[in-house]
C-alpha cells in the first residue's frame, strides 16, 4: 500500500510546523525549500490542513502557519483517512467497477481488506507528537533554528 504524495506532504507540513517553537510561525516558502515541494502544491495542502482544523494560518507580512491544536491531539490515522480518498487497492474493492469473475469466492479481497484495516489501526496509535518526539534531530535535518 502506498500513500499519495498529497498525504505524505500533509504529514511533512505537520511535522515541520510541529517542530517550530510555540512562538514561531512556519512559512510555505521554507517548507517548500526544505522538502523540494512546489509552493503552489503546498498552498493547497495547507488550505486543506487548515480546513480540517490542523493548522492555523496567519495572514500578513509576518504571517505564516502553526499547528491549530496540540500535536498530541492530532491522530495520524485520522489524518491519513482525511487525505486518502481511496483505499480500494484492488478492482474488487469497488463494486461499481468490479469485473473480476472470482469475486464471490475470492479470499484475497478479505485478506487485503484485513491488511488495510491493520495498517490504519497501527497509524491510529500515533499522534503528530509521536512523529516529532525527536524534535532536535528533526530541526537539525530541516535547518530550523
Image (cartoon, grey):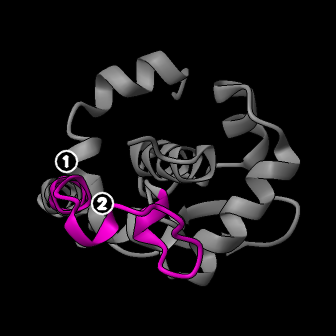
Task: Report which quarter residue 56 is drawn in.
Answer: bottom right
Residue 53, image x, y percentages: 50, 81
Structural distance between the alpha carbons of marks 2 and 1:
9 Å
Magenta-tinted stretch: 91-116
Question: In the displayed structure, would residue 15 be above or below residue 145?
Answer: below
Is there a contact, CB below 8 Å, between mark 2 and mark 1? yes
Looking at the image, which is closer to me, 87 or 83?
A: 87
Is 57 magenta? The answer is no
Q: Is residue 69 left or right of residue 10?
A: left
Task: Report which quarter residue 79 is drawn in.
Answer: bottom left
Question: In the displayed structure, would residue 26 be above or below residue 142?
Answer: below
Question: In the displayed structure, would residue 93 be above or below residue 125?
Answer: below
- Residue name at image x 80 percent, y 50 percent: 41
Q: Which residue is mark 1?
A: 130
> Which of the labelled discs sits on residue 76, or is there none?
2
Which badge, 2 or 1, comes first in the chain's sequence? Answer: 2
Amino acid at each position: 500500500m502506498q500513500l499519495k504524495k498529497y498525504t505524505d506532504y500533509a504529514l511533512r507540513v505537520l511535522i515541520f510546523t510541529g517542530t517550530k517553537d510555540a512562538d514561531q510561525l512556519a512559512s510555505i516558502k521554507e517548507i517548500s525549500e526544505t522538502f523540494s515541494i512546489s509552493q503552489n502544491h503546498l498552498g493547497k495542502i495547507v488550505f486543506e490542513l487548515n480546513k480540517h482544523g490542523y493548522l492555523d494560518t496567519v495572514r500578513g507580512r509576518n504571517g505564516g502557519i502553526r499547528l491549530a491544536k496540540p500535536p498530541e491531539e492530532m491522530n495520524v490515522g485520522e489524518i491519513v483517512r482525511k487525505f486518502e480518498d481511496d483505499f480500494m487497492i484492488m478492482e474488487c474493492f469497488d463494486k461499481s467497477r468490479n469485473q473480476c469473475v472470482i469475486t464471490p469466492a475470492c479470499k484475497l479481497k478479505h485478506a487485503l481488506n484485513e491488511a488495510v484495516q491493520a495498517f490504519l489501526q497501527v497509524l491510529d496509535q500515533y499522534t503528530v507528537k509521536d512523529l516529532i518526539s525527536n524534535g532536535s534531530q528533526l530541526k537539525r535535518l530541516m535547518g530550523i533554528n
